[in-house]
Amino acid sequence: MAPVEQDALAVREQLFHDRVRECIICALLFVSLYILCHFIITHFKKHTDFTAVHDDEDAAVNRIALGLCTFTLAVALGAVLLLPFSIISNEVLLSFPQNYYIQWLNGSLVHGLWNLVFLFSNLSLVFLMPFAYFFTESEGFAGSKKGIMARVYETSVVLLLLTLLVLGMVWVASAIVSNNAASRQSLYDLWEYYLPYLYSCISLFGVLLLLLCTPFGLSTMFTVTGKLLVKPRLLEDLDEQLSCTRLEEAAVSRRISSGKASCWLNLNVELLREQFFAIRSKRRKLELRHRASPWQRNLGYPLAMLGLLALTGISVLIVCFHVLELLLDDAAMPRGIQDASLGQVSFSIFGSFGAALQVVLIFYLMVSSVVGFYSSPLFTRLLPEWQDTPLTKIIGNCVSLLVLSSALPVFSRTLGITRFDLLGDFGRFNWLGNFYIVFLYNMGFAGLTTLCLVKKVSWAVQAELICAFGEDRDMGTGAGVSHVRPPPQLSRSPSAQVCTSCRCP
């Protein structure tokens, strides 16, 4: 064999080994995410929906739908990790350019991960999640033989009709926006135009949803953190709360005992027991908080609040600086690239520290958007319950989280949180090149975040002033008592005026 042929064969062999290695790494990463998401969904699902006590067919259908939900949640988690993984990979290759043990970490692997996440996001949003919902609601066509395959046929027909409806709406919308013969001709290309355009609309909806949820979540994070951590004694009097809770628990316990011992009282014992268990649970939580160490009480809460305030302030400052860049430099506009050239230059002017800060801010904004999403009045009902979440609510949560997470890379790049350009089909969205949309989006985020924070701080100051001057006690809503629901009042039975069974006085 000639030397030239040997070199060509060696190159093809190396490309083959690189491709196999990338496929193995992608498969291992996705399997790890799938197992993690399976444990998460298992802790929230309603176990009675998956037991074969009443109907083995329904249990099997629910298990299939649960597997599709787990797949979708794994894709959502992969979309969240996509941009941080790319930024960290670039910094690692910059720090260790010739290290043998990280040769597998290259631009081809990162670009492949972006393409896989984009493909699986489209697949989950357009086909898998609608199929899972219609599959759980289907019963088979009338007159057909009952079974899982009958449900599959009905679900496939309904999904096909829904797909035709959605594609028709996309065709009409695109024809209205781009009213020319070339755009209509390109609409006949399903793979090259239809699906990217449809996903561009879904991504725009997700980015707008992040614009509404993230500022609200940034302000809500302070309240959520305050509930999870123990406040200093200057801001929270746990002794008073614990004393009131113990007195209320003892009062409800005596009412339950008196209701069993006398026939003069007409009590709703079940309601009293539910209230007693709720008060006891609250008392145990207060006791755990009361036993917190002074370090945890006096240092943990202030540091957490300062950390949240610093991250929020840095995010707003970066967005404001990005607004100025948009006005002065066209290079600040988000754009997509097809070749991931990693390990050449850092994506932050502060080097590795700036890259680490970008990763922290991306995760912080994602957590804030999820908190804001579940705290908003429109989506509060979607909040999953521990061991008691029905399957339809699980499907709704998976779709919502996938919409938010798949828009996170575009959201972070549009706001200027990172300089890492969008890879693959993520950079093909039509609206990314519109200066007015990007500029107004940045201004809207900065304005909404500032407004939510000012409103949150003003309300907190107002509440502290009311408590300091004692106006809440004058209005009958004293601290430590306003949040306690009084137990149901004892009432004398209207029909029983004299006790003849036990001769009570």
Image (tube, helix red, strand yellow):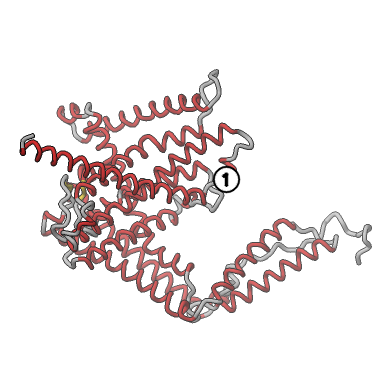
Q: Percent x, y for residue 368?
A: 37, 59
Q: In which quarter of the image is residue 343?
A: bottom left
385 vs 124: above or below = below
252 vs 104: above or below = below
Q: Quadrant of residue 93?
A: bottom left
What residue is at 17 percent from the left and 49 percent from the top?
340
455 vs 469: above or below = above
Query: Which is more toward the observer, 116 or 239?
Result: 116
Query: Which is more toward the observer, 246 or 14?
Result: 14
Q: Which amino acid does label 1 sit on?
A: His
Q: Percent x, y for residue 249?
A: 68, 69
What residue is at 15 percent from the left and 52 percent from the top?
341
Assess disc 1: are there few (<14), some (14-19) or many (≥20) residues with their C-alpha within 10 Å of its C-alpha: some
Instruction: Name the residue that disc number 1 marks.
Output: 47
68 vs 455: above or below = above
User: Does residue 146 appear left or right of residue 223 in this picture?
Assistant: right
Query: Which is more toward the observer, 239 or 497?
Result: 239
User: Does residue 406 appear left or right of residue 238 in this picture?
Assistant: left
Q: Quadrant of the C terminus?
A: bottom right
User: Does residue 486 appear left or right of residue 491 in this picture?
Assistant: left
Whether residue 429 appears in this view of the structure is no
What residue is at 14 percent from the left and 41 percent from the top?
10
What residue is at 22 percent from the left and 36 percent from the top?
177
Which residue reaches farthest top?
Answer: 143
Q: In which quarter of the image is the N terminus?
A: top left
Describe the element under mark 1 as helix, strand or loop. Answer: helix
Q: Percent x, y for residue 35?
A: 43, 48
